[in-house]
């Protein structure tokens, strides 16, 4: 615990209760964070007659959820049920197991686990069993209005394990009552109803310590607020929903499985729960794989609060190449998987050959596919295009890329183009063009995944005459050409202490730490390194926020220590 530390008491990640007079105020349930997980927990608890105090570190509510597209992946949701689509439990669990733990997944194993450890499988079961109930209850409580994009496919809709390939994603309804909304609508609906129900929200309060009684039960928190430190007693439980550590460079370097250049999470996501959880004996899991996505290198390094990742590269006459001028991935595959290939390590050369790949497109692609949706780097005229490079020939374009990489060499570990890049790029373009003319990509099968087709259609109509293969078209034989240097980045991290199927935080023995719960990106994700579908971040956050609240409100009132403990 905290007894071995020599830090001042006010800075310890764990403190001790010293009687009721040691607290500034008290409530039934303290919720740390105000994103999807936090608001789901708050509304679930307050509708069960619990007094709820929500502490938000930032000056405004919503966290990263507020700036997101606010998709949430909910298997067996009511829209599927009402349409007569049977999203069977066994089928959904098989799909999730296949992606979450591919190294353990056994298609022939019993449906009780599909080869996964029981504790991992139990979390996936809990997600399936409670995700739809969580959303249904929010809707019934008047806290959420839903939009259902029935044709939106999962990210691996093409896998044989996926028996319900589309329709699991939900969205908040927009302000006009007809179209899908985004994060502002989502948080606005939840927080408005939460206020009506009596959820007490305090912004500008950074929780910095847990308070324990002499039985090592969590009985409150310490928060740095505008007027100084505040000690809040939680009569029943504390629920952390405080986001990941994507904006903490030291933690990123210590834990992530590869380098990243920025994030689209909010600046307050600095992993505050990690030292507190560690101080009460909770081991950390899943720390190496965040929710990944590519970003134009300059945007990533700038890391502005309004930063967006590139969720889908627009265009048909475009390719991505590594430092050797070679294609290395299906450019249209989902963002998380594209970024994982950027972490590929070449042991013979001791380098990341794909770390900062170059996305190249022609003028026709520029004219047809420019925009800002989903972090599109093909910038419209007059927009921020400092990340875009130009050349009348491929050689001139490569020269411009070399100059930019040299300017940023201190930020990339000296990443540069190979001396043979120019010739290799010509060969890559020629090979791609030959196959694209026939509407094929035998190298990476680009255009075959249903989600790629969906994303491309959302970004714009197919080029006339290219409807049969809308994701592939030869690059022009003449310039001008355009390029941007991409880099790996994060939506947020998804590692932290392990929780059980009640969202209780577990100690090293696998036992619940009394009074402590976690949901969302501050705890280890049920997804492993996978990304099941759009909304696979927010869907589990809601499900486990719901489970945390159900268990927290059923907790007994915890007694406080009557004498101070050194």
Image: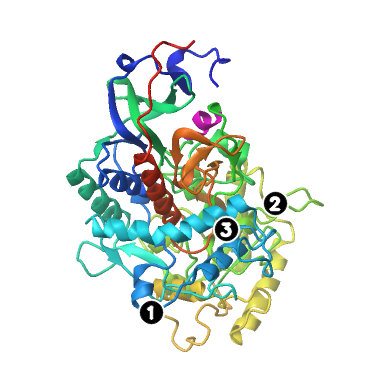
Disc nearer the start of the sequence (2/3): 2
- Which residue in the structure is indicated by mark 1? 84
Part of the protein shown in magenta:
273-278
Q: Is residue 272 visible?
A: no
Do tag 1 and tag 3 residues touch (Cβ < 8 Å)?
A: no
Residue 514 image point, x, y percent: 47, 33
Residue 341 on the magenta span: no
Label 1 secondary element: loop
Do tag 2 and tag 3 residues touch (Cβ < 8 Å)?
A: no
Up the image or down, 447 lies above or below 553; here it is: below
Q: Residues within 10 Å of mark 3 (few under 14, many from 20)?
A: many
Q: Is residue 126 visible?
A: yes
Q: Mark 2 or mark 3: which is in front?
A: 3
Query: Could you tell me how many numbered marks the image carries?
Result: 3
Q: Work out whether residue 112 or residue 504 is closer to the camera in this orientation and state it.
A: 112
Q: Which residue lies most toward the left here?
A: 196
Q: Work out whether residue 352 or residue 562 is closer to the camera in this orientation and state it.
A: 562
Q: Quadrant of residue 243?
A: top left
Disc nearer the start of the sequence (1/3): 1
- Which residue in the structure is indicated by mark 3? 530
Distance (Cα) linking label 1 and label 3:
28 Å
Q: Mark 1 or mark 3: which is in front?
A: 1
| Residue 444 shown left or right of residue 503 in the figure | right
Up the image or down, 359 lies above or below 255; here it is: below
- Which residue in the structure is indicated by mark 2? 352
Distance (Cα) linking label 2 and label 1:
48 Å
């Amino acid at each position: 615990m905290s007894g071995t530390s020599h830090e001042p008491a006010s800075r310890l990640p764990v403190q001790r209760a010293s009687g009721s007079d040691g607290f500034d105020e008290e409530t039934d349930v303290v919720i740390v964070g105000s994103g999807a997980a936090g608001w789901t927990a708050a509304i679930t608890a307050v509708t069960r007659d619990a007094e709820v105090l929500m502490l938000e570190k930032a000056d405004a509510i919503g966290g990263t959820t507020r700036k997101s597209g606010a998709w949430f992946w909910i298997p067996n949701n009511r829209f599927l049920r009402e349409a007569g689509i049977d999203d069977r439990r066994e089928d959904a669990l098989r799909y999730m197991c296949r992606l979450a733990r591919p190294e353990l997944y056994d298609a022939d194993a019993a449906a009780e686990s599909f080869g996964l450890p029981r504790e991992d499988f139990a979390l996936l079961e809990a997600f399936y069993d409670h995700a739809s109930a969580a959303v249904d209850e929010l809707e019934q409580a008047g806290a959420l209005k839903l939009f259902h994009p029935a044709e939106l496919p999962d990210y691996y809709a093409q896998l044989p394990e996926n028996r319900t390939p589309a329709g699991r994603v939900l969205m908040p309804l927009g302000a006009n009552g007809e179209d899908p909304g985004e994060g502002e609508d989502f948080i606005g609906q939840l927080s408005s109803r939460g206020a009506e129900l009596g959820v007490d929200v305090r912004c500008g309060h950074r929780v910095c310590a847990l308070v324990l009684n002499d039985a090592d039960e969590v009985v409150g928190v310490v928060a740095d607020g505008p007027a100084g430190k505040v000690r809040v007693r939680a009569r029943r439980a504390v629920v952390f929903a405080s986001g990941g550590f994507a904006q903490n460079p030291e933690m990123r370097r210590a834990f992530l499985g590869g380098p990243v250049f920025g994030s689209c999470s909010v600046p307050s996501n600095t992993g505050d729960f990690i030292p507190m959880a560690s101080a009460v004996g909770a081991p950390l899991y899943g720390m190496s794989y965040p929710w990944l996505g590519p970003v134009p290198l300059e945007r990533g390094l700038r890391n502005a609060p309004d930063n967006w990742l590139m969720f889908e590269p627009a265009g048909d006459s475009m390719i991505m190449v590594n430092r050797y001028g070679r294609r290395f991935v299906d450019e249209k595959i989902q963002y998380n998987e594209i970024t994982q290939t950027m972490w590929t390590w070449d042991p013979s050369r001791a380098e990341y050959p794909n770390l900062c790949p170059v996305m190249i497109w022609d003028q026709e692609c520029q004219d047809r596919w420019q925009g800002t949706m989903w972090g599109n780097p093909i910038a419209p005229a007059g927009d921020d295009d400092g990340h875009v490079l130009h050349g009348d020939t491929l050689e001139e374009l490569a020269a411009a890329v070399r100059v930019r990489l040299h300017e940023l060499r201190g930020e990339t570990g000296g990443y540069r183009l190979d001396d043979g890049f120019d010739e290799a790029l010509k060969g890559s373009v020629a090979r791609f063009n030959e196959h694209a003319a026939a509407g094929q990509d035998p190298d990476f099968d680009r255009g075959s995944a249903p989600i790629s087709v969906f994303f491309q259609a959302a970004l714009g109509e197919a080029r006339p005459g290219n409807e049969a293969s809308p994701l592939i078209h030869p690059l022009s034989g003449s310039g001008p050409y355009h390029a941007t240097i991409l880099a790996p980045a994060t939506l947020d991290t998804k590692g932290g202490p392990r929780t059980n199927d009640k969202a209780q935080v577990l100690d090293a023995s696998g036992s619940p730490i009394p009074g402590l719960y976690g949901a969302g990106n501050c705890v280890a994700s049920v997804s492993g390194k996978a990304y099941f579908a759009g909304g696979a971040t927010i869907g589990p956050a809601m499900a486990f926020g719901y489970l945390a609240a159900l268990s927290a409100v059923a907790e007994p009132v915890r007694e406080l220590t009557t004498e101070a403990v050194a």
